[in-house]
């Protein structure tokens, strides 16, 4: 399920500078600072398997898993046995997702100093960790097992792939522009950063033993979406939504989107199987953003209620197109009100005036023709262009 809020009110005189800046920073970080990450990560991955480190650790994990299933005590006291490459490939993903094992491994509880292969394993592990730390996303991503304040913020500007970056930046633009113009730049920037903190906080609480870094702006962006639902509450907003292969537009009260978005993340979390998507972080961002939005509405009151109002000028192309179609059928009685509506929005719209003149020519006895002709002449004399009626 996909639900995206829409707003056509983006002012050229007051552009969403913070949103643009965040998009530019994220893009530059990915292409310049993270530019060599894929190669460095591949080098660390190849070293892990070719050096023999994978064989040592996966062998211990197999023994650990068997003992855990049978609840028979300490792994470190059990001798390891060699495993083939196919077995290593099978158990490696499971091992990496077993936070308890990985934590015990790093604490020297799986391979203890008393083990014969401890020195060799420690040397290989240190080299592998050194290679991983050269990968920007590993060095500056947020790791729940070893949380650092700096990494909470740096992780918001890192992405794992171009599609990860692109998807996040699209949602940031769609949600961010509305809030920046509606709440002001200072609150908006604070909302973005604090929502990211909330996202990392809930993720850390849920996966406190995880040693895999969390990266991406999606938690902070989810916070913007959560804040939007509370700030605009019962106000009707236009949304685009898709359910499978079906998609459409509709208008709903903003607050209705909060349980829908949270419900979707919870559903994905428990039914999506193994995934690299941090659904818990998204939930943390949504809830945190909603609370911050409530704080704004309750204590600051910095909300532009007109942020979702459609720019009247956006109606003009549709009104003119409908008028042209009616004129092709010589239905001037229905076409004229549409053209007049355009002129109410933009009194000197040249296309509308020409269309109105063409309508009035069909009824030359009416005073409308003279009024329209006078308006056109007045408009044309104020320009230096040549016009042909």
Image: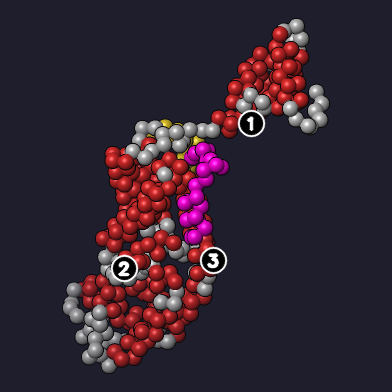
Q: Is residue 20 magenta?
A: yes
Q: Which residue is mark 3?
A: 31
Residue 95 placement (x, y as % from top left): 33, 73
Residue at 49% over, 47% down: 16
Residue at 74% of width from left, 27% of height from top?
Answer: 382
Secondary structure at badge 1 equals helix
Give the percent coordinates (x, y) of residue 271: 35, 53
Q: Nearer the viewer, residue 75 or 188?
A: 188
Which residue is more in the foreground, 175 or 111?
Answer: 175
Give neighbour class at mark 3: few <14, some 14-19, many 20+ (Cα, 10 Å).
few
Query: On the image, which quarter does residue 353 sit in?
Result: top right
**Residue under circle 1?**
317
Q: Which residue in the rendered view is the most extreme toward the bottom?
A: 116
Q: CA distance from mark 1 to mark 2?
A: 53 Å
Q: Is residue 108 above or below residue 233?
A: below
What residue did someone put label 2 on?
148
Q: Which residues are magenta?
A: 6-26
Residue 323: where, in percent of width, then height? Answer: 66, 23
- Tag 1 and tag 3, C-beta contact below 8 Å: no
Q: Is residue 223 left or right of residue 168?
A: left
x, y (%) of residue 290?
32, 45
Q: Residue furthest front?
A: 382
Tell me the quarter of the picture where residue 88 sits.
Answer: bottom left
| Left or right: 112 as drawn, with respect to 22 | left
Does any portion of residue 74 appear in the rendered image?
Answer: yes
């Amino acid at each position: 399920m996909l639900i995206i809020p829409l707003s056509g009110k983006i002012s050229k005189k007051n552009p969403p500078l913070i949103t643009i800046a965040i998009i530019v920073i994220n893009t530059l970080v990915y292409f310049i600072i993270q530019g060599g990450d894929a190669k460095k990560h591949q080098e660390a991955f190849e070293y892990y398997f070719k050096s023999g480190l994978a064989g040592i650790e996966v062998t211990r994990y197999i023994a650990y898993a068997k003992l855990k299933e049978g609840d028979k005590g300490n792994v470190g006291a059990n001798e390891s046995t060699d495993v083939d490459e196919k077995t290593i490939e099978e158990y490696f993903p499971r091992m990496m997702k077993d936070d308890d094992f990985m934590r015990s491994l790093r604490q020297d509880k799986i391979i203890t100093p008393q083990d014969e292969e401890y020195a060799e394993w420690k040397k290989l592990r240190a080299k592998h960790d050194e290679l991983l730390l050269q990968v920007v996303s590993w060095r500056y991503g947020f790791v729940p097992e070893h949380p650092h304040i700096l990494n909470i913020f740096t992780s918001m500007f890192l992405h794992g792939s171009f599609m990860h970056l692109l998807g996040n930046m699209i949602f940031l633009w769609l949600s961010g522009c509305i809030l920046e113009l509606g709440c002001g730049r200072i609150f908006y920037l604070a909302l973005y950063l604090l929502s990211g903190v909330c996202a990392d906080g809930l993720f850390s609480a849920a996966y406190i033993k995880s040693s895999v870094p969390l990266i991406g702006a999606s938690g902070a962006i989810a916070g913007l979406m959560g804040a939007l639902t509370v700030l605009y509450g019962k106000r009707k907003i236009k949304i685009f939504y898709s359910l499978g292969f079906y998609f459409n537009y509709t208008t709903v009260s903003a607050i209705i989107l909060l349980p829908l978005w949270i419900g979707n993340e919870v559903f994905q979390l428990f039914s999506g199987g193994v995934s690299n998507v941090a659904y818990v972080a998204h939930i943390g961002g949504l809830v945190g953003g909603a609370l911050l939005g409530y704080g704004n509405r309750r204590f600051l009151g910095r909300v532009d209620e007109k942020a979702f109002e459609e720019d009247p000028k956006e109606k003009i192309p549709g009104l003119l197109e409908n008028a042209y179609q009616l004129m092709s059928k010589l239905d001037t009685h229905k076409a004229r009100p549409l053209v007049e509506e355009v002129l109410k929005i933009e009194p000197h719209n040249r296309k509308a005036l020409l269309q109105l003149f063409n309508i009035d020519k069909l009824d030359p006895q009416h005073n409308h023709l003279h009024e329209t002709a006078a308006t056109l002449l007045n408009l044309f004399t104020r320009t230096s262009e040549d016009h042909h009626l």
